[in-house]
Image (cartoon, coloured by chain):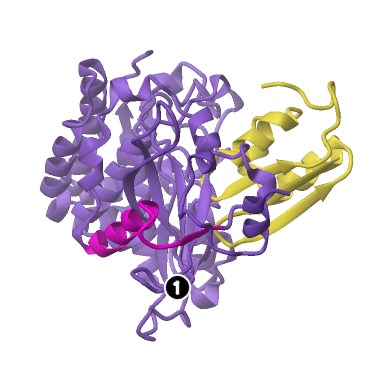
Chain colours: A yellow, B purple
Amino acid sequence: MRVIIHDLYKNTQLVYEGDPVTMERKLYEDFPWAVAGNEGNLEFILYTIDHTQNFGVEVVDPLPHPFLKGP
Amino acid sequence: MSLQDFQRRMGMPLAKSTSPDDFSAIRKETDTAGADVVDHTADLKAHPPSMGLKVEAYRKAIAHGSPLMRTTPVGLDGKTAKIVYKIHSANDLPVGKSVLVKPYHEKLHPKTKYWQNHPINGWAEMTNQSLYHAAGMGDSHQEVHVSEHDMGPGFDKHPAVIVHMDPRADYVEHLHPMDFEPKMGVEAAKIGVMDFLSNNLDRHRHNLMVRTDGATDSSGMPYSSSLLAIDHGRSFQYHASHKGVPSHVDDFFLGPMTIPEDMRTTKNAEGKTTDNLLPYLQSDAMQSVSEAAQGSGAPAVHDASHFLRVIEQWWPDVRDRVISTFGDRLNSIKEPRMKQHLLENFQARVEKLDDIAARAEWYKSSARIHDLDVPLKVWDR
């Protein structure tokens, strides 16, 4: 799957590709505050990033359930 | 591709400055209960006077008086409840500046209910800005105002929070010890204290920014390095404690201490009865400042002698204005129980700061972590 995280403040983007487990590990490096406490719930991690002021999350190629768990 | 999408991709101004379609995500993320809790009309004028021209120019633009260029990526249409507009013409606002529009009455996610329980996002953002100015630290807060927008049927005069984005700012995690200035340590401590006052549990490392030397203002004058606090919509909840969020704290006397696992979550009972000043000075963002400070030989933000001195020297001078401003802000809260909830918790934190300022020497010599506790009075909506 592929996720693009748009930094609306800096007008840049970060692209994450791969399986959800690898993606979560990479996200933890860049967004530890969004992952901590939400481990294993990629959908909610992305929601958390999306609902902070500067970031917008674009899921380009989502994998179906059960890889994306609901909140 | 529609003409509108084409124009957005090509970076051309739209025929209209804004369109109700732009706000589909904001409509979707609006909590209709929010209007029963907060009256937004006072917030239309709650920005500081220094922002007057910018606010006037923005309102003229969304009323189609001058062009704005929407720059939010097309892929985010309808997903994220935020929109970025770039100021296209030099009519009234500086060319190249951007504004970010976000919901005023933002819907709360069920999974975050343990720490976000009240639909007061827009009020919280504007109240933080007012309190920063009352506390003599307005420059440390992002510039925000509230405007009404035509967001379509049923939302024809709907409020949104407008953030005037500062192009000089970078995330605090990029702050290098070489760029650290002692005054930033003071700013950080004050921001941590304001987070404590407002129960802001959201001070992660992307919600504190730094403006470093080399940046210049519109007249070419250099700015000195300074901190910029952003995104305060989730504050003033008083629904969860910051206690236990760090795994380690530095006790004034006992040194580094490990916080037991069951104390680290804000979901536990302890986290529902008391809160504590110290974790606000040790949040993710504050850790970034502390690392830069220590790298340059300055004390960490959570160093007791540092933050107690800041409170002692600053709080007594500003507390009356802060209290008075908060009282004014409470007039916008329509729900009496909510108003009482805000007042009780805010007052408890003010009393703690008063005590620290009055007995700073005792705190410096004898205090322990629990002496920085305050009662947390939770109201389950």
Q: Is residue B195 magenta?
A: no
Name the residue type under label 1.
Val
Main SS of the magenta segment?
helix
Name the outermost residue toward the bottom.
B220
Please name the residue shown 41% across and 20% down the image: B272
Q: Judge from the rendering whether residue B123 lies leftward or rightward of residue B155; answer left or right.
A: left
Q: Dot 1, crowdedness within 10 Å: few (<14), some or many (≥20)?
A: few
Please name the residue shown 47% across and 26% down the image: B115
In the image shown, does B347 or A4 lie closer to the viewer?
A4
Asked if residue B35 is positioned above or below residue B79 in the image, the reply reads above
The region drawn magenta spans: B50-70
Q: Judge from the rendering whether residue B142 lies leftward or rightward of residue B82; answer left or right.
A: left
Q: Is residue A39 visible?
A: no
Counting from the top left corner in percent of width and height, residue B214 is at 48, 83
Q: Which residue is mark 1?
A: B95
Counting from the top left corner in percent of width and height, residue A25 is at 79, 43
Q: Is residue B222 visible?
A: yes
Counting from the top left corner in percent of width and height, residue B274 is at 36, 25
Please name the residue shown 43% across and 63% down the image: B299
Chain for numbered disc 1: B
Quarter of the rendering containing residue B181: bottom left
